[in-house]
Amino acid sequence: MKVKELMNMDIITVNINAPLREIAEKLLTEKTGCVIVTNNNNDIAGIITPSDLFRFVFPDYNEIREHGKYFFDSLSIRQRLYEWENIPASSFMTKFPEVINKESPAIEAAAIMKAFKINHLPVTEKGGIVGLITSKDILKSFVLYDLNNISIIN
């Protein structure tokens, strides 16, 4: 089975200069696990998942130990979000994400995801983005279809 048979073509993209607020709204209101960040030439520049947003917005353990009182005040968190409202995607995206060609075997996509510990893989054709394949898409192909009738290798 090829990537093109499993990929989702309804991808959400944002420009590299899109503000955090716009990206957060898309991630939280659209039925997507990521947004693809493109540069001004519509080339893939990065990818942002809810986990990336979470890591960027909320403090880590060391920050809490150092500035604990600040982070336990909901007004402070709101202020932090307000200050970051216009921070561009380029500040917190995963740059140069792994990609896969739509003609590649699905098993190759699974291997890439496993090797790089990722769940979303932009799908390309002739250098342009044409879709997205997720670990869930690949798992569904194994679980929902008779494995004797499909080949994930070719």
Image: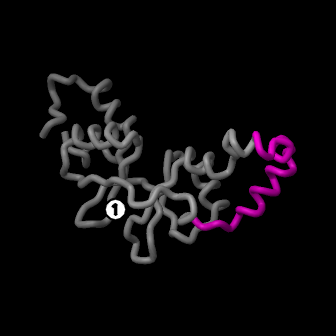
* Residue at 64 percent of width and 55 percent of height: 25
* Residue at 75 percent of width and 56 percent of height: 81
Vertical arrangement, residue 27 with respect to residue 111, above or below = below
The one of 21 and 53 positioned closer to us in this rendering: 53
Whether 72 is among the magenta residues is yes
Left or right of 108, for residue 84: right
Left or right of 43, for residue 148: left
Task: Give the prevailing secondary structure in the magenta stretch.
Answer: helix
Q: Quadrant of residue 96?
A: bottom left
Name the residue type under label 1: Ile
Vertical arrangement, residue 20 with respect to residue 43, above or below = above
Residue 10: % across, % down: 42, 53
Going by the picture, which residue comes out furthest to the front?
Answer: 66
Q: What SS does tag 1 mark?
A: strand
In the picture of the structure, the residue carrying the numbered disc 1 is 129
Residue 59: % across, % down: 70, 46
Going by the picture, which residue comes out furthest to the left?
Answer: 154
Q: Quadrant of the C terminus?
A: top left
Residue 13: % across, % down: 48, 61
Q: Which residues are magenta?
A: 65-88
